[in-house]
Amino acid sequence: MENALESLSKEDLITLIRQKDTLLETSQKHLLEKDSEILQKKAEIDKLRRMLFGQKRERFETSPIQLPLDFGESLSEQEIKELEEFINKKTEAVKDEEKKAPRGPHPGRSPLPKHLSVQEIVLEPQEDTTGMMLIGNEVTDSLQYEPSRFYIQRIVRPKYAPKAANLLDEPVGIVIAELPQSGFAKCIAGTGLIAQILIDKYCDHLPLYRQLQRFKREGIDIAPATMDLDIPEQREPLIPDNLSQ
């Protein structure tokens, strides 16, 4: 090989070197194209993986009827101006049609429930109505809400004893009304409150700790352990064990 190169002339050596450089450039260009193709394929594979295994908001499926978005980059200034004029004409035509179209009667408001009680407020005019005659009433109804209220139910049972009985000794014949059974022994909460707590938790899905926050807003401080929130405290539970499960 060395003998063959030595036998070549200067012009032949220059030609051979140029051919070698051209071959190297072609090979390098081919490698760059391959690298670009590999990167593109990798990006497509990553996109397909997100579509198959990613979350729903990360998935993307191209609709066959969806056209690519064009924000006017490929339009000339004249074409953009003509497009704006066309849109303005269409907008004015739609507005004119809406003005000419007859409007139907308003369906009116939905009727208020008839089973609700009515709190009537009469507002008399500030002017002097002496000597005037009432000709009618202008009635305006609105649906209002009054937050539920807490109250203490105190049961007082008078005790009676015979007049001849000696109260210092063991009393006999004492008469007293029987205490109504609430259904929950040693429970300070009434049946109405327990029913509301259970409805809020199991029907309206309102956690007990949020109910406690509502109680605090009303100035009623109930310990979490009393609401059976697994916090140790020496108190009787507000909700009986057989209902808190």
Image: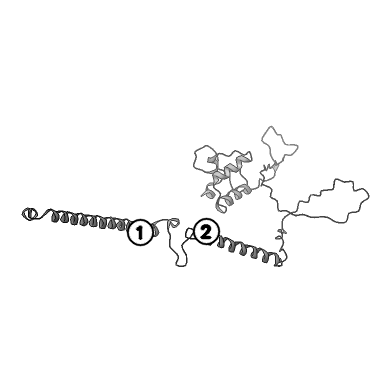
Is the residue 63 above or below the residue 198 in the image? below
Query: Taking 115 as reference, is 58 left or right?
Result: left
What is the quadrant of the N terminus in the image? Answer: bottom left
Where residue 105 appears, x then y in whole percent? 73, 65
For label 2, the SS is: helix
Q: Which residue is mark 1?
A: 44
Would you identify the image quadrant in which residue 62 lies?
Answer: bottom left
Viewer-side residue, 158 vs 190: 190
Query: Taking 242 as reference, is 220 left or right?
Result: right
Q: Residue at x 9, y 54 (%)?
A: 5
Q: Which mark is residue 186?
A: none
The type of residue carrying mark 2 is Glu
Q: Which residue is mark 2?
A: 77
Viewer-side residue, 211 vs 191: 211
Is the residue 237 above or below the residue 93 in the image? above
Q: Residue at x 14, y 55 (%)?
A: 11
Tell us which disc is closer to us: 2 or 1.
2
Is the residue 166 above or below the residue 176 in the image? above
